Amino acid sequence: MKIVVGLGNFGDKYAYTFHNMGFLAAECLAERLGFRFSKRVCEAQIAKGYIEGEPVIVAKPLTYMNLSGRAVLQLLKRHKASLADLLILFDDIDIAKGDIRVRPKGSAGTHNGMRNVIELVGSGDFARVRIGIGPKPEFVPIADYVLSEVPRSERQTLFDAIGRAADEAEKWLQGQA
């Protein structure tokens, strides 16, 4: 069992905000794999399928971002998966817009959603793909920035990064990362 979770905020209001890069990457990955988001379990919307006979879940928590750990923990428990079976996709304000970073484990940095995931699963020993959305404009509070809609002029840069994040998730699912 492999579980890929894209962090974001559910609902049309947040669809194209900086904080939803994880959701968008999860949607991109699911589409490539031919999976469809259709079920709601463990406080998440999930898409299920198989890769080379192994079950795979791609999930988008239905909690708000800062409570994402609830859905992640429930998914791990329900499917008896370990942290080695988990990959998280999320935005990172500390990385330049359009860049991605792949890590086998780490801290939450300044990301409250990741902080909640690490707190509830009890460790940062799981893979992650960070999608750069930074830096924020000076004099704009972080919460206002991450919840603002991505300007049309920056969307292609971020959509390209989302595609690269999905590439990395595919490699991880195939054991190449």
Image (spheres, helix red, strand yellow):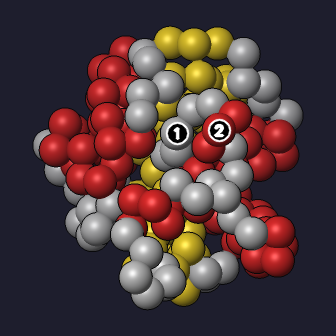
Q: Which mark is residue 22?
A: none
How far from the left and from the top, in percent, is residue 20? 59, 51
Quarter of the view holding residue 131 = bottom right
Q: Residue at x 82, y 77 (%)?
A: 153
Report the amino acid beneath label 2.
Lys
Compute the Cα span from label 2 to label 1.
Answer: 9 Å
| 167 relative to 122, above or below | below
Task: Specify whether 163 is left or right of 147.
Answer: right
Check if mark 2's residue and mark 1's residue have beta carbons within 8 Å. yes
Is the C terminus in the top left, top right, bottom left or bottom right quadrant? bottom right
Q: Residue 140, position in %: x, y?
A: 43, 75
Q: Residue at x 44, y 18 (%)?
A: 43
- Give the percent coordinates (x, y) of residue 111: 33, 61
Q: How many marks?
A: 2
The residue at which mark 2 appears reads as 13
Residue bearing mark 1: 9
Q: Is 28 on the left-hand or right-hand side of 103?
A: right
Picture residue at 62% right of the left edge, 55% below the top: 17
Relative vertical location of residue 45 with respect to residue 144 in this rendering, above or below:
above
